[in-house]
Image (cartoon, rainbow, N blue to C red):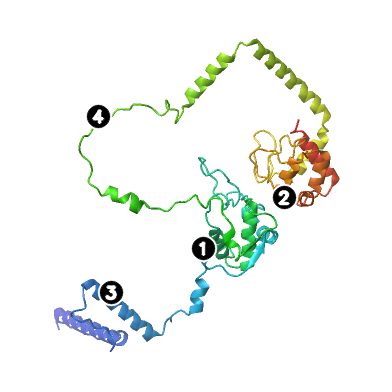
Amino acid sequence: MSKSLKLYGLTGVSAIAVLTAAYNFADRTIAPMPSDAPILAADSGSPDMMFIASARAEAAADAKRMGLGREALAEEVAAWDLDVAPDGTGLPVGSGSVAEGEEVFIAQCAVCHGDFAEGVGNWPKLAGGDGTLADEDPLKTVGSYWPYLSTAWDYIHRSMPFGAAQTLSADDTYAMVAYILYSNFIVEDDFVLSNENFLEVEMPNSDGFIVDDRAETEYPRFSEPACMENCKDSVEITMRAAVLDVTPEEEGEAEAEEIMEDANAGSAADEEIEQMAAAETEAEPAAETAALDMALVEDGENVFRQCKACHQVGEGAQNRVGPQLNGVMGREMAAVDGFRYSKTLEQMGADGMVWNEETMAEFMADPRGYIKGTKMSFAGLRKDEDIAAVTEYLKSFSQ
């Protein structure tokens, strides 16, 4: 037999084997067409609707055929229906006090948001920011920005605490929201929040939002034909903002200050006043430094580290969770501008009470016992020597 015949024979046998294997594979693995396959009528509508109807019918048929899924029960839907509306719809029955909320907040939230809701690191601040919304860098917190209390309740109950969402009871959520309100000076320390008085709480920025009515008031104007008549031949700049004092330039401000200094310079009376002030400035620190126990001041600096989370001293000190303490010794209570004190402390200041060694020692030993209703949750210093050291340290910033 020639080589050609052998080649053709082998090719034919191989082709028959492949076709036989393919037929057997298809016969075993390809399912027959179902008897209830959807059939579209000729008048089923547009091609798009025909395609969608076919897909839905086929999916329904597959679900029944395979026994997958079922309709959700009413109680299952209710378990996911957690939202609370601004009008109180969805609020569960419950209540919680500020004191209870403080305990829950410190245990569950303080690691990120701080004991006083002041925020830790880059975690959000929940308190403060009053009067900053018009600033270049506003602080938007529950107290300064949020218009509805329901937003806070809903978010906390649904998503907090971090890593353990929806583990808080309704009462714990009411208590935590009450504590956040207290931290923002919206309620007093004896306040109890419940589903019954929830809508009575007025948020400071409740009127700070407007309904977006641009679709009715502005959008129609955009579709009107543009006016193409009586146009100006050219556009000219008639005045610059710096001249109008809208955006003053730094160079102009510096120049103005120099002019004022030149105008006020040379006055004999002014020179005499400046010399007297300089002499007093040089003389006073020497006397004050001698009056301080510098070793005790150094000890006080170490103890004061417990206070730095809320209070600042020294150059550039600012109000934080607590007021800055520069000049506190000898100063009337509740006298730092721009800080909102508790009503009790404000009354004590109005009564003429002053921070001195005696009052400071009583306060640091038992802050909440000395000033009822204070926001300060610090338990106090237990050692008399620590109290004396911090007092001496504060004196060094009060001279």
The amino acid pointed to by label 1 is Asp
Image marks 3 and 2: residues in contact by CB distance under 8 Å? no
Label 4 element class = loop
* Eye-nearest disc, 3 or 2: 2
Mark found first going from the N terminus, 4 or 2: 4
Mark found first going from the N terminus, 3 or 2: 3
Depicted 239 relative to depicted 178: above or below: above
According to the picture, the residue beneath numbered tag 4 turns out to be 234
According to the picture, the residue beneath numbered tag 3 turns out to be 52
Q: Is residue 4 visible?
A: yes
Label 1 element class = loop
* Eye-nearest disc, 1 or 3: 1
Residue 292, image x, y percentages: 82, 31
Q: CA distance from mark 1 to mark 3?
A: 40 Å
Numbered label attached to residue 374: 2
Q: Residues within 10 Å of mark 3 (few under 14, many from 20)?
A: few
The amino acid pointed to by label 2 is Thr
Q: CA distance from mark 1 to mark 4?
A: 55 Å
Residue 174, image x, y percentages: 62, 63
Q: Residues within 10 Å of mark 4 (few under 14, many from 20)?
A: few
Mark found first going from the N terminus, 1 or 4: 1
Q: Residues within 10 Å of mark 1 (few under 14, many from 20)?
A: few
